[in-house]
Image (cartoon, grey):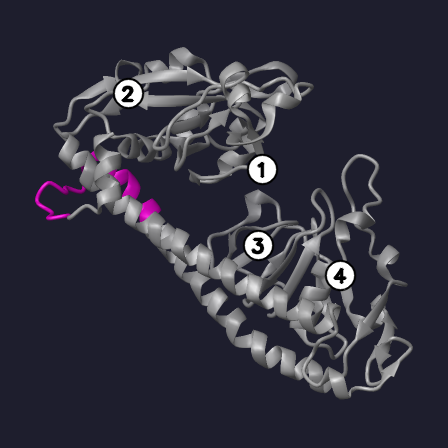
Amino acid sequence: MSSWPVVALGSKVRFLSGGTPRKDEAKYWNGEIPWVGSAEMVQRRISDTELHVTEDGAREGSKLVSANTVLVVVRGMSLAKEFRVAITECELTFNQDLKALQPAADLSAVFLFYYLLSQNSAIRDSASEAAHGTKKLDMSVLEQWPIPLPPLEVQGKIAAILSAYDDLIANNQRRIALLESMAEEIYREWFVRMRFPGHQQVQPFERLPSSWTLKPFNDFCVLKRGYDLPDSSMQPGDYPVIASTSIKGFHNEFKVNPPVITTGRSGSLGTVLLVNKESWPLNTALYVKDFCGNSPFLIFYTLRSLKLETFNVGAGVPTLNRNHLSNVGIAVPDAALQRRFAAILGPMNAQASALFEVNEKLATTRDALLPHLISGKLKVDHLDIQLPPSMREKVTA
């Protein structure tokens, strides 16, 4: 067991409250300063946000904090599922559902960030009921929460090890985003702007090349509703379980062979995913059952271009009805052009998929190391870890 002293979090941390500037005051909004809401706290590191405030908004309606500040969600529906923690990478503001934690000189902000992540389930379970079915964390709970206090040098080594994994993951995510952006641009250049290879020599026919065909959606691809899989029935495995907008988890069985293309059917619409692995699409998603002889890459980017969220037919819960797509006309390129498109995008997609799998393994290893490092069960005192300059600044902040 670790010999580190254990102290109350409130004895080493100053808690700051945020707020929301008045929405009817134009001088508070559309500035340069990021403003964080609880929904954006799904990120581990925050460098930008959807909404921004001005200096007046930060001063009058919220709280301005510096880079390397730990943020936690203390109120909202998300607390029923998880205790969200993030660390800032720039100066920003935040709303009233969050608290900012400023540590004392002998507590590294990055160590604090990872320690709170290690306490996710326990802190989440300590939340109490609030109004309208939401959850809240009483400040007395956080203030009394125990935190181990190893020497600052040890805190730095622990933070550096875990940060190295997050740095690698973030770098891979940027590479994936770049590959996806390049692929999207190729699709738009070829099939939206109609500047595909050899387009100058192609004879047009009613504004489409004569070798193309205008088909109803159901002759372009066939969508099918996904399959039920209650959370209680999920068993640990290697096969992605795909919800309406993302991979929800992994199961020991699959329903669909790759390539698996899905989009949201219920709850959230508009997100289109391509997974190159046997998968289990959930009943909140639709998946492409029949490609009708077309390139999966063409179908994927065409679905993304259709803005499927505009086909919502749900009164309360957003819902996509496949029948409403059946008569949408799709301009389908000839097979030779589709093959050329796939030949370019295939390697790019394979590289992005490989990076995604690497990130899954990095995250699994990081999460396995986290409790052992934070508790002191895995000793780092003897390790000669050379911290990068940015890490030294964080550790001593």
Q: Residue at x 28, y 45 (%)?
A: 162
Residue 61 location (% of width, % of height): 55, 16
Name the residue beneath numbered marker 1.
Answer: 50
State yes or no: residue 285 in magenta: no
Q: Earlier in the sequence, mark 4 or mark 1?
A: 1
Range shown magenta: 366-385
Secondary structure at badge 4 equals: strand
Give the number of the disc on residue 301: none
Give the number of the disc on residue 146: 2
The three-letter amino acid code for the residue at tag 1 is Glu
Residue 230 location (% of width, % of height): 61, 45
Q: Earlier in the sequence, mark 1 or mark 3?
A: 1
Name the residue beneath numbered marker 4.
Answer: 224
The three-letter amino acid code for the residue at tag 4 is Lys
Which dot, 4 or 1, sits closer to the camera?
A: 1
Name the residue beneath numbered marker 3.
Answer: 241
Secondary structure at badge 2 equals: strand
Residue 259, picture quadrant: bottom right
Say above or below: 18 vs 343.
above
Say whether residue 241 is left or right of residue 319.
left
> Which image quadrant: the N terminus?
top left
Which dot, 2 or 3, sits closer to the camera?
A: 2
Residue placed farthest to the left in the image?
Answer: 382
Q: CA distance from mark 1 to mark 2?
A: 34 Å
Residue 179 location (% of width, % of height): 52, 65
